[in-house]
Image: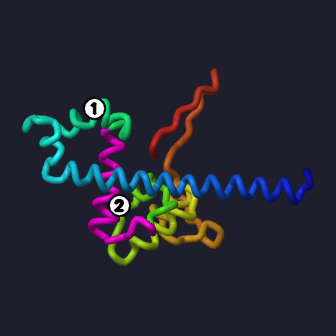
Amino acid sequence: MSQLQKSKKIFEAYSKLKTLSQSQTGIDFEKARLLSFLKRNENYKLLTGSLTASWASFLADPEIKSVVNSVSTANRWVRLYDTYVEKFKISLAELLGADTLMLDIAIPKLTKSNVEDFVERAKSLSRQDFKRRLRFGDVDEITCEHKFQKKYVLQECKKCGYQIKEKK
């Protein structure tokens, strides 16, 4: 196999992987849409036949559990759908390919003016870069004038070398 053929196969595999990832995001948001509807006004209680049923007990049903593996995942999907699609009117097509964990951690900082920017960043940045941008904004690490502050004092035992960090 020539280097060109190998490169084409590698790129093809990468492209398929990206397509699958985007498809999975679409499936997740479709699940989120349905879960949001069921959770809204406690619609799930009609399915359980019990007015005292909880959201967690509904999600524990074996048929539902095969689709949603945990209460926290279901709640995250509902939160994402309610925030991005219902509140900020972002289309599902725009959300395809975005990392849902990144979208979730951005929710507290979202405004009408920055929501689209965060969606694009969730598609293009690594999780580490996304979290740094979320925390520090668009400050560039390379051009920053770095004003360091000590957060911890490291103490070491001279006899055995055991170390502890103490907050300053």
Q: Which residue is mark 1?
A: 60
Look at discs 1 and 2 and give the one toward the viewer.
Answer: 1
Q: Is residue 139 left or right of residue 118?
A: right
Name the quadrant containing residue 82: bottom left
Decide: few, some or many residues near mark 1? Use Cα within 10 Å; few <14, some 14-19, many ≥20: some
**Residue 64 at x, y = what percent?**
31, 37
Circle number at residue 107: 2
**Residue 109 at x, y = what percent?**
36, 65
Q: Is residue 80 left or right of residue 118?
A: left
Name the quadrant containing residue 144: bottom right
Residue type beneath disc 2: Ile
Q: Is residue 101 magenta?
A: no
Dominant SS type (magenta): helix
Which residue: 37% across, 40% down?
67
Circle number at residue 34: none
Q: Is residue 67 left or right of residue 145?
A: left
**Vertical position of residue 85 compared to residue 13: above or below:** below
Q: Are marks 1 and 2 in contact (CB under 8 Å)?
A: no
| Sequence-first disc among 1 and 2 | 1
Colour mode of the rendering: rainbow
For the residue pair 75 and 28, the one nearer the viewer reads as 28
**Residue 164 at x, y = what percent?**
53, 33
**Residue 4 at x, y = what percent?**
87, 60
Distance from label 1 to label 2 (Cα)? Answer: 27 Å
Residue interval drawn in magenta = 71-94
Which residue: 37% across, 55% down?
30
Decide: few, some or many residues near mark 2? Use Cα within 10 Å; few <14, some 14-19, many ≥20: some
Which residue: 37% across, 78% down?
113
Q: Is residue 149 left or right of residue 159?
A: left
- Per the image, label 2 sits on a secondary structure element best described as helix
For the residue pair 146 and 119, the one nearer the viewer reads as 119
